[in-house]
Each structure stands twice: as C-alpha cells, then as structure tokens.
Image (spheres, rainbow, N blue to C red):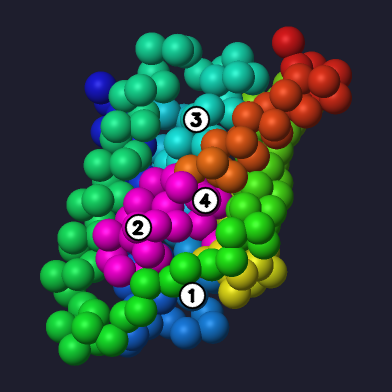
Amino acid sequence: MKKAIVEFIGTFFLVFTIGMTVITPGAGAMAPLAIGTVLAVMIFAGGHISGGHFNPAVTLGVFIRGKCPAKDVVPYWIAQFTAAAVAAAAVQYLKPIEELAKLTAGQPAVGPALLVEFLFTFALVWVVLNTATAKGTAGNSFYGLAIGFTVLVGAYSVGSISGGAFNPAVALGVTLMGLSAWSSIWIFLVANLAGGAVAAFAFKALAEDAD
C-alpha cells in the first residue's frame, strides 16, 4: 500500500504540472522543462520506496525486466491512473473557465503519433532500466535527472506531433483535461505499453547484468 501511495503522489504531481504549465496561463515554451524537472524530483523523492515509476509503461518494463513483483503491477497501475484523473480534476478547478472553454482536443495523425510515442517511451524505459535497475549503475545519484531529461527531450522533440505523453496515465490525464481527444487515447495506450515492453526485452538481451 505504501508503494502504491508513493506512485499516486508522483504521478499526481507529474500530470498536475503538465496541465498547469500547458493550459493558459501556463509556462509556454518552458513547459517541457517544468515537466521533466517535476518527474526528476518526484523520482528522487519516491524512488527508494516504490521505484519511482509514475508511468504504467515503466511499471510494465520494470516488471518484464524482473525488478517489479507481479503483485505490485495492478496496484501501481490503479494508483497511476487514479492520480492522473485526480490531477486533471484539480487542473480544471484551478484554471480559468474561459481558458478551458478555448481548448481544442488534439487529434494527432495516427501513424506519426504511434511512431514517436513508441520511440520516446522506449527511450524513457530504456533509460530507467539502465540507470535505476542495472548493477553497473547501482547507487548512482543521477538516475532521476536522466529519466526527467529523457521526457524533456521527448517533449521538445516530438511534442508537436503527438503531444508528448510517453505515459498512459499522462494520456488519460490530458484527455480528461480536454487537451487530447478520447478517440486518440488508444494511440498512447498501444504505443506507450509497446515501447515499454520492447525496451525491457532489449535490456534483457543487451545488458550484461540483466539477470
């Protein structure tokens, strides 16, 4: 239960920060920096308790890698998706009604969105596994920054194509906020979970200490 609560807290602040910085009045072009930073600090804060996943795709990847017990997967997913929904409600409560009314739910082109969401979720989970679960990097102090900056780079690189979720919980949150269309949520679920799974299999095949 403690680990699931930590996953809720970290996911909440990630999705909350996304909504507060992306929806006007927000942080404009600096939004990805705030998003990557909040992910990093929440990982530093909760990583020693839950692993600091804050992302169902990361949980899947860490499970396949063998560093997340099967009994934790569903509780983590419940906590992550619930946190995203609560964060979306908080953002909608805090943002001006007139600004929320202006939002147009994004509907990205399917092919490009699937590709970039897969690629950067792969990159994210690959970085997580190599910095936070590998024996060769055990005890390092940079893993939170490495993970947060992966999301920052992804958001700047391909955010204009897909919205830059790289996280099924984030996809739920931004959809509830009205930033993304419900008809597009499957793109994120498929691409993000596939990216996380493939990254885990790649790690197991390539890392010398994958066992």
Residue receiving disc 1: 31
Q: Earlier in the sequence, mark 4 or mark 1?
A: 1
Q: CA distance from mark 4 to mark 2?
A: 10 Å
- Disc 1 marks a residue whose amino acid type is Ala
Q: CA distance from mark 4 to mark 1?
A: 23 Å
Residue 52 as seen in the image, left or right of residue 17: right
Residue receiving disc 4: 187
- Please give the label number shown on residue 59: 3
Q: CA distance from mark 3 to mark 4?
A: 18 Å
Which is more foreground, mark 3 or mark 4?
4
Quadrant of the snapshot with the C terminus:
top right
Part of the protein shown in magenta: 164-188
Query: What number of labels is visible?
Result: 4
Instruction: Give the dominant element type of the magenta stretch: helix, strand or loop.
Output: helix
Q: CA distance from mark 1 to mark 3?
A: 25 Å
Task: Report if residue 132 is visible in the image.
Answer: no
For disc 3, the neighbor class at 10 Å (few under 14, some 14 to 19, many from 20) is many
Percent across and percent down for residue 160 are 59, 74
Mark 4 in CB contact with mark 1 (< 8 angstroms): no
Q: CA distance from mark 1 to mark 2?
A: 23 Å
Relative to the observer, which residue lies in front, 60 or 210?
A: 60
Q: Secondary structure at mark 3?
A: helix
Which is more foreground, mark 3 or mark 2?
2
For disc 2, the neighbor class at 10 Å (few under 14, some 14 to 19, many from 20) is some
Q: Is residue 182 magenta?
A: yes
Q: Against 200, is 189 above or below?
A: below
Q: Is residue 16 magenta?
A: no
- Disc 3 marks a residue whose amino acid type is Thr
Which is more foreground, mark 1 or mark 2?
2
